[in-house]
Image: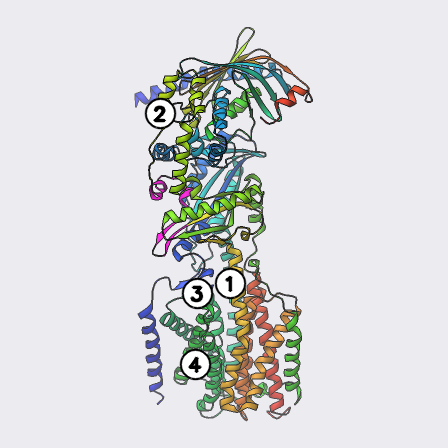
Amino acid sequence: MMESRPVAWLVVAAAFALAAAARYQPGWLQTDILALAGNGGAAPAAAREKLDGQLQRSLLWMLVSPAGDTERLAEATEELAEKLRKSEAIDSLEYRWAESEGFRKEWALLFPLRQQLLARDDRALLQASPDKLVQRQLAAIYGPQSGGLDLERDPFGIFRHYFAAGPQLSSEVHGDIPVQRGQSGAFTLVRATARPVQLSGGIRTPLLDLRLKLRQWAEGQGLQLLAVGAPLHTEYAAAGAQREIRLIGGLSIAAICLLSLLVFRSPGPLLLSIFAIACGIGSGTAAVIALLGQMHILAFVFGTTVTGLAIDYAFHFICNRLRPGPARDGELLPGLLLGLLSSCLAFFALALTPFPLLRQMGLFVGFGLIGAWLTVVLLFPALLRLRPRPLAIAGRLALGGKHWYGAALAAAVLLGLAALPRIEFADDLQLFYRPPQFLADDERQLNQHLPARAESRYFLVQSGDWQTVLQREWQLAGQLRALQQAGRLGYFQALSEKFPPLEVQRADWALMRSFYASAPVQGFYTQLGYSEAEARELVADLQRPFRELTLEAWLAVAGQNYRDLWLGCDGGGCASVVRLYGLDGGLDAVPAIEGVTPVDPPRAIAAVMSQQRDLLLRLLPLVLLVAFAVIALRTGVRRGLSIIGMPLAALAATLAAVVISGSGVSLFHVAALLLIFGIGVDYAVFSHLSRGEEKNYTLLAIALAGVTTLLGFGLLALSRTPAIADFGLTLAVGTILTLLLTALFFARAEPKGGNR
Amino acid sequence: MRGLFLSLLLCCAALPPAMALESRSEVALQQIEARLQKSPQMLGRFAQKKTLPQLPRPLLSSGVVALSEERGVSWRVIEPIESHLILSGDSAGDDALARQVAYPLLQIFRGNFAALEALFHVDAQLLDDNWEVTLTPKEGPLATFVSSIEVSGNSGIEHIRLAEASQAITEMQLIGLQPVDGEDPQFTTEFSEP
C-alpha cells in the first residue's frame, strides 16, 4: 500500500502535465488588465496590443538649450540620437521629423489629388465666401513674403495649406531636425521605442542608467535633457518591487528556515513543505491551462498566494509525525480531507462565475490545493523522516477561559457588522505605483515646454472596412471640433483630418471645381497682369480629374504620427485611434457614435479592479456557505457552525480593522480576505477534529503554519507599493486574529492545564 | 600620402585669412547693429516690387509698415489692393513654408542679425555712409526656397532684397521709418487685427 502511493502521485502528476501540454500555447499568461473586463475590453486584441506597444514602450527625450543656440542644439541632438541608437535598451528612434525625403514622397503621391484635398479652414472658407480665398492669396503675393508660389498648379496655395496644416510651433530646421523655440530657450525632441523589459532574475535598470548618463553628458554640453515615458516608470517600479521582494522575501525565508530548524531540528520538513506548495502551484497552473487555455498574471499571483495555504496540510502532517510511538498518519486523514474539501469546493464555486479573474483563480486555487494535498498524503509518508518527541510547550499556546472563544466569535462578527455601513472603496491606480520625484520633475518641465501632449484617453474607431472607419472618424471629428470651439479641447489628431473619407474628398473636389470656374479666380489672374485669354487658359488647366487613393497607399508614405493612428485590419475588422490633446473634462462629453468607443485606460483599469473586487466581496458569503455545507455534512450543523464561525469571525474582524484604519477597500484587500478565509477554515477544521494528546501537535502545526504565513506574506506590509502593503497588512491582521481564535478554541476545548 | 599632406597644409594655410574675414564681418555686424536706430515702436511707409518668373510684369505695391518689439511687424498694403498682415513669432500663420520666411524677416526688421547666424551665413560690410548685410541660407529646408537676402541701410534698414530659389525677387524699400510713441493712434491701428 505504502509503495503504491508514490506511484499514484506520479500518475496524477503525469496526468496534470499531459493535460496542460495538450492545450499549452505560447502567450498563455496574459498581462493586459483590460482583458479581465467581462466584455473582453473595448478593442480587438491585436489593436490593443499595437496600442499597448506604442504606449508602454514609447519614450520622449527633450534636449533643451536654455541659451537658445539652435545650431548647436541640432548637432547635440544628432549626438544624442547616436548614443541612444547604440544603447541596448533602445529599439528604434525618430528625431528627423522634417525628413525631407519622406515629405517629398508624400507630396509626390498627393499633389495630383490637389483638387480634392483641403485643409479644414480652406474648406470652410470655400463654402462660406470663396472671394476671401482670392483676397487672402493676393494679400500674400503683395506681402513681404511669397515662399514658393505656384501660380499655375496651386495658385491659391490650397494644397500647400493642406499639406502643412496642423498645429506647429515656430521652428527652425537644421539638417532635417526641427528646433523649436520657446519662452525658455530652444528644444528638440527625440522619440524612442524601448526594448521590452526583461523580467530576469537580476535587478537591471538599463533605461534609468542611460537617462542618468545622458543627463550628465547633456549638462557637460550646457544643455538639459528631459525624459518621459512609461518604460522609465515600468523599470523603476520593477526594480523597486524586485528589491523589496529580495529584502522581504529574504528576511521571511531566513526566519521560516530558522523557525523550522528550531522546531523540527531537521531541514527535511521545510524542504518537503516547499515542495508540496510548488506541486500545488504546478497543478493549479496545469489545470487552468488545460481547462481554460490561458490565465491572467493577476490570477496567477493571487492564486499562487492562496495556494500557499497548502503549508497548513504539510505542517499538520509533519507535526503529527512528532507524536511518540508508531506513525499514525491515518488519524489525520479525516481532518485533512475535510479541510481540503471545504476550501476546495468553496474556490470551485468561484470558478462557476462568468468572470475571467474569478474563474481562473477558483480553478487555480482549487486544483492547486488538490495537488498539494495529494503530495502531502501520497509522498510525505514515504519521504518524511522525523524523530518523535513530546511537545509539552504546545499546550501553553492555548489562551483564555472556557467561554472566551464564543464571546470572541460574537464580538468579531458584531464588529464586522458595525463596520459594514462605513465601508469605503479605493480603485486609484496610485495603489500600484507612485512615480518618483525625479521622473515627475522631468514630466513637469517637459510639459512646460510643450503646449500639449497626447492624452492617455483616446477614441477607438472600428468598422468592417477602412472607408467606414474614416466615415465614423469624420463624424467624430465634427463633435470634437465643437469641443474645440467651446475651448474644452486643444487639438485632436485623426487620420480623416488628413485623409478624409472618399465622399468628403468628392464633395471637396466639386467645391474646388466650381471655385476654379468662378469669376473671382479669373479676376485673380488678370489682377496679376495676365490677359483675359491667358487667364482662361490657366483656369482651364487648374481642373483635375477626381482620383481614388486607398488609405493603405497613403499610409505607405505618410508620417509616423499618422501611421501610428492606424491599428490595421484583421478578421475582427479595421480600427483606428483618434488622439486628443489638452482635453478639459471627460470623454462622455461626446455623444455616442456607432463604432466609436471612448477609451480611458486608467479609468478602465480602475473600473475592472472595482468590478472584480465587488464580485469577490459579494461571493465571499457564498464561499463561506459552500464550506459550511461541506463541513456540516461531515460534522453536523451545530459543530459545522462552530467551525465556520472561526473564518467568519476572522473575516469580519479583519474587514472591520481595514475600515477603522480609514483605508479604502481595494481588490488587494479582498484577495487577502480570501486567503484569510482559507486559513480560517483549515485551522478551524484541524482544531475541531483533533482529539486527546493529538491536540498539542495540531496546535503546534497551526501555530507554525500561522507564523509562516505571517512571515511569508505579512511582511509584505512593509512594501512601499500601497497595493502590496495593503495585502500584507490585511493578511497579517487576519492571520493573527485566526491564530488568536484558535488559541481561544483550544482553551475552551480543554480546560487550562488539561493538555499538559 | 603626399597629396593628403599638401591638402592639409593648404587647408591650414587658408585658415588664418578665412578667420580674419569672419571676424571682420563680425565686427562690421556689431557696428551695424550699434548704428541701427532701435526703438520699441517704429512707423513708416514701404514700396515693394515683386518679380515673379511666371508673371509678365513686376507687381508693385505700397503701404504702411509698423514695427513693434512686442507685437512684430504690421504690413498694410494700400495700393493696388488693400490687405493687412501681421508677422509675429507666434502668429505667422499655419503655413510651414511661409513661417520659415517669416522668422528671418521678423529678425531683419528688428535689426537682430545675430539671431540669424544659426540659419544663415551672415556677411556684413560697412560702406562709406551705408552698410550692407548679405544672408545666405545654410544647408537645410530654408535653402530650398530662399537663395539670399540682402539688407542695406544707414541709421535704419532702408532696403531688403529677398531672392527665392524659384527666381522670385522681392525688393522692399522702407521709407521714413521713425520711432513713435506706443500710444500713437496710427501705430495702434496698425496692430489691430487685419
Q: Do the residues labelled 2 and 4 touch (CB within 8 Å)?
A: no
Identify the disc placed on residue A373.
Answer: 4
Residue of label 1: A608
**Viewer-nearest of discs 2 and 3:** 2
Residue of label 2: A540
Residue of label 3: A296
* Alpha carbons under labels 4 and 3: distance apart: 24 Å
Q: Label 3 marks which chain's residue? A: A
Query: What kind of residue is marked 3?
Result: His
Residue toward you, A476 or A661: A476
Specify whether disc 3 shares its chain with disc 1. Answer: yes
**Viewer-nearest of discs 1 and 4:** 1
Query: What kind of residue is marked 4?
Result: Trp
* Residue A499: image location, x then y, percent: 40, 40
Quarter of the C terminus of chain A within the rendering: bottom right
Determine whether the residue tagged by mark 1 lies in a helix, strand or loop: helix
Quarter of the N terminus of chain A within the rendering: bottom left
Question: Measuring 56% from the left and 43% from the top, which residue is drawn there?
Answer: A447
Which of the two discs, 2 and 4, labels the residue nearer the N terminus? 4
Question: Measuring 47% from the left and 60% from the top, which residue is drawn there?
Answer: A34
* Residue A633: image location, x then y, percent: 49, 89
* Alpha carbons under labels 3 and 1: distance apart: 13 Å
Magenta stretch: give its range: A550-575
